[in-house]
Image (tube, rainbow, N blue to C red):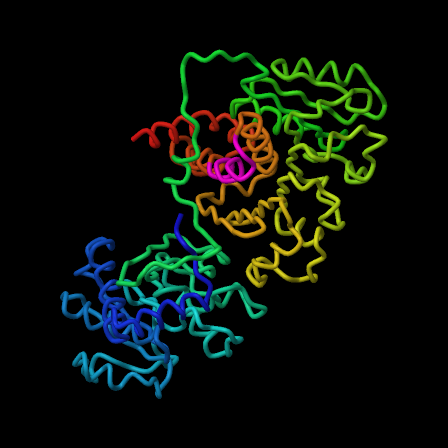
Amino acid sequence: MIPVLTKEQAYKLDKDTIESGYLSQEELMDNAGKAVAQFFCEKIRNPFSKTVIVVCGKGNNGADGVVAHSYLKKYNVSSKIVFTETKHGHSKLLKKYKISESEISVYNDKIKFDKYDCIIDGIFGIGLSRNLSDKYIKIIKELNKNKNLISIDIPSGAFSDGTDFYLEDSVVNSKFTITFGFPKLGHFLVPISNLFISDIGFKTISSNIQKIEFSDIANILKSLNKKRNVHKYTKGKCQIIAGSYIYPGASILCSLAAQKTGSGYVHLFFEDPTDNENYIDNLNCQLSDIIVSNYINQEHDNYSPTLVGSGRDESIFFFQYEEEYKVLDMNNRYIIDAGEIYPCSMHVYPEKSIITPHFGEYKDLIDIEEGISIEKWHLEEAQKGISKRIIILKSFNTFIITEDMIYIMDRGPSLLATAGTGDVLSGILVSLLSQGYSRLEASILGTYLHAEAANYYMNNISKDGMTASDLIDCIPLAFNELRKNSEL
């Protein structure tokens, strides 16, 4: 896993590196600027035929931009600098790198950013912690008219750790972002594409926020033996308490996802308060490989991992009525989703549960102030009162939150913003639990597999139009790709 740094940790790493004598501030700045220029020359198509403008603010991010410009010129790339302020504070740097007056200008309304082939954004870095003035909002909107934007360290307007000042239309919409040493938390609190991490000489650092890499998945995956002494129960048995007359499809999706992920025996307990046997019989016919029962009249297995909540009627809160509905042992392992995520205290839920809210559901669960979005919210708050539970917070990135660590899974494409895909994730998770993975292993592997199933569809079938049923069909194909790559 890769450490993800908060603003304070990033500043500390910078300070410790300089004070140790390992690298000076000037060397770090030179390495950063050179890394940006080298990225441009190596990754951008036909770089030496492009015109570039580097937009520099007053701080260290702007200084990195000045150095990047000097190296672009050295590499024979046509580059100009535009400072956002007349008193930019980089005069010594301009002199050091022998940058002439003809190469620089100061921002004014006549500058047309869209006439350049590429813009390098060096306005604000990770230290931004104030509301943007109208001037800077206007600059960023003008920059966003150009589709070829490269941001240094973090897109200007984004904040390192989340803030109350976030405004979506005042963040640079970067095509690429180049950061140094380690990713920052702010990279995952806004929808950033194509993040590149450049090693400029920092030493290692520990962090309680980690980004999941494929090597972590390879270490989690259990080996596959063609011949094993197993049967349908030992291969993996799970229970699903899901669905209602309002949302019957959710129960079907999560049950099929559990089966496609590898459970040998899936038992769906469907909510049917009218005790209509024909309805249950119809579901049994539709789900011929899955056992379907009316949960009101059935005893439950006290040991099999259980999914509760997908498509359930929100007027019924399962754990509140444990005597009436014969709820399973509270020491069992649960996946808690959708209709079961109820405004209440966290302690109501079993400690061995995995709770899977999107941010709107999570706000209801812990009573976050109305109007707060994930971009403005401080992620560490989710660890308060969590105890042994695991929260999988679903957004454009996925955050797996435990008592002492936060894991970030950033592989999911926007195709997953489709009705029913959350039910598919819940089915994957309960299936992995049934196959012997720990709750943390299932959370990490399950969210990654869910994302890769969507990526498989996008890369092999279509960039558009994926349904939750399509996603289920891609689970075994994506799982197979993970196994093949892990063996390599």
Screen quadrant of the C terminus:
top left
Query: Which one is nearer the viewer's eye here, 472 or 307?
Result: 307
Query: Which one is nearer the viewer's eye here, 314 or 381?
Result: 381
Query: Which one is nearer the viewer's eye here, 32 or 472?
Result: 32
Compared to 211, does 435 lie above or below?
A: above
Q: Tell which residue pokes out farthest to the bottom in this image.
A: 87
Residue 231 point in image, percent of width and height: 55, 12
Residue 356 visible, this angle:
yes
Q: Looking at the rendering, which quadrant does residue 31 occupy?
A: bottom left
Residue 297 point in image, percent of width and height: 82, 20
- At x 60%, y 14%, the residue is 289
- At x 25%, y 80%, the residue is 104
> Which portion, as a residue range, is magenta?
437-448
Residue 254 magenta: no
Compared to 399, does 221 lie above or below?
A: above
Residue 80 visible, this angle:
no
Q: Looking at the rendering, which quadrant does residue 114 occupy?
A: bottom left
Compared to 467, does 47 lie above or below?
A: below
Q: Is residue 228 left or right of residue 181?
A: right
Q: Is residue 155 left or right of residue 369?
A: left
